[in-house]
Amino acid sequence: MTSGKVRPRRSTAPVVAVTGAATGVGRLLARRLAAGGRVRKVVAIDGSRGDAPGVLWRVADVRDPLLFSRLADVDVLVHTDVDGSPDTDPRERRTYNVRGVQTVVTACAAARVRHVVLVTSAMVYGAAPDNPVPLPEDAPPRAEADFGIVGDYLEMEETAAQAARTHPGLAVTVVRPAALAGPGVDTVVTRHFEAPRLLAVKGCAPRWQFCHIEDLAAALEQVAVGALAAGPSAAPGRPAPGRPPAVVAVGCDGWLEMAEVEEITGRRHLELPAAVTFGTAQRLHRLGLTPAPATDLHYVAYPWVVDCATLRSAGWKPAYDNASALRALLEESAGRRALAGRRLGGREATMATAAGATVAVIGAAAAVRRARRRRR
């Protein structure tokens, strides 16, 4: 005899975990997922508890080998806990970022998580004067694997690709945003707009594409719980129907030309030969005067605009255009000054602002000469 009560069916909505949920895009994503009603539960993972409401906090280090024990009921994990700061020691940053991905994918395979979403950058495509505008999502990565942040992204992606091959039941989607903008974003690219003049390389017209972190969070939600069909970005060999795409690019529609950037920023550009620009930058980096290698400077001189075909075909649209994203970047960096990626303060910033980039380049060259004399 039955009681007449109908047992409620278990929700088929996924349980989604977000690493780095206490700050940045991870925090935005955790809040979106908790408020959106598209998931059964949100598991927020970070080294310390954050303020996102309506989530289940599990305080953990993403490099902890016991991370798998915190993922027992998780269906999808979005990994945003990546250190992209220009001020972090490059070796320490590389160790943190790569070991984090290694631990996350291994833990997900052990816990039978079915889908990992990894956030890297469209920088992996490389910035070059002959890049098509825009780059297709399935374009091969052409960036140089050095000790800059791009080298981190390349190694992270290779680690994730190897995990997908080793664990066939684990789908991995790499999300590659354009130049990030918004609250809390501090990168080599954003610091370019803290300089008194904008850099340009002779013979090449830069084109600028941005991605606001709110749009990135919305895109990650779509990748994690939306029905993204396998499109041109899913490669090689195209995944089976219903399997998440391998690569998804995210960014504002179109791009800005240099004249538009100058109008929005109120800064003029300084055009220099490529040999002078990159040669000086590399010497300054070797002397420890700038945090980023010269290859990172390619991303403010050459185009790396991406075509967001997969998201567009799924109906996703960015809330920000390139102009509004750039204004958000300027608002975030207001009052800061940087040259060649190095943040300036006090007297340095005042001198740089007054003298302009031409004097800054001359000063940089003088610093190189003085350093050489000291070595002799």
Image (cartoon, rainbow, N blue to C red):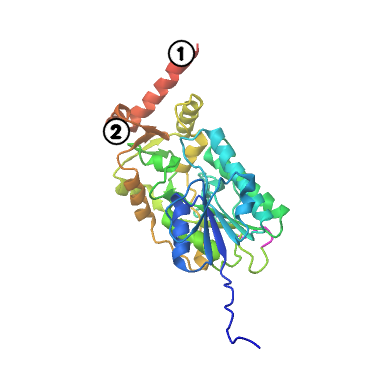
Which residue reaches farthest top? 376
Give coordinates of residue 305: x percent, y percent. 48, 52
Give yes or no for contact between labels 1 and 2 (Cβ–Cβ under 8 Å). no
Asked if 262 appears above or below 273 in the picture, the reply is below
Give coordinates of residue 20: x percent, y percent. 50, 49
Closest to the observer: 26 or 242? Answer: 26
Pick whichever of labels 1 and 2 is earlier in the sequence.
2
Give coordinates of residue 287: x percent, y percent. 48, 24
Name the residue type under label 2.
Thr
Query: At x 32% / y 41%, what residue is drawn?
Result: 268
Side of 255 where 248 appears, left or right: right
Side of 254 where 112 appears, left or right: right
Give coordinates of residue 205: x percent, y percent. 43, 45
Quadrant where the N terminus is found in the figure = bottom right
Query: At x 55% / y 34%, what residue is drawn?
Result: 92
**What number is the disc on residue 316?**
none
Asked if 27 appears above or below 128 in the picture, the reply is below
**Distance from Cα at disc 1 to Cα at disc 2:** 28 Å
**What number is the disc on residue 373?**
1
Asked if 50 appears above or below 98 in the picture, the reply is below
Query: At x 29% / y 33%, what residue is drawn?
Result: 353
Name the residue type under label 1.
Arg
Where are the magenta residues, as a range? 234-238
Q: Is residue 352 visible?
A: yes
Location of mark 2 (residue): 353
* Residue 182 belongs to the span the image colors magenta: no
Could you classify mark 2 by the number of other residues whose Cα lies within 10 Å: few (under 14), some (14-19), or many (20 or more)?
some
Q: How many marks?
A: 2
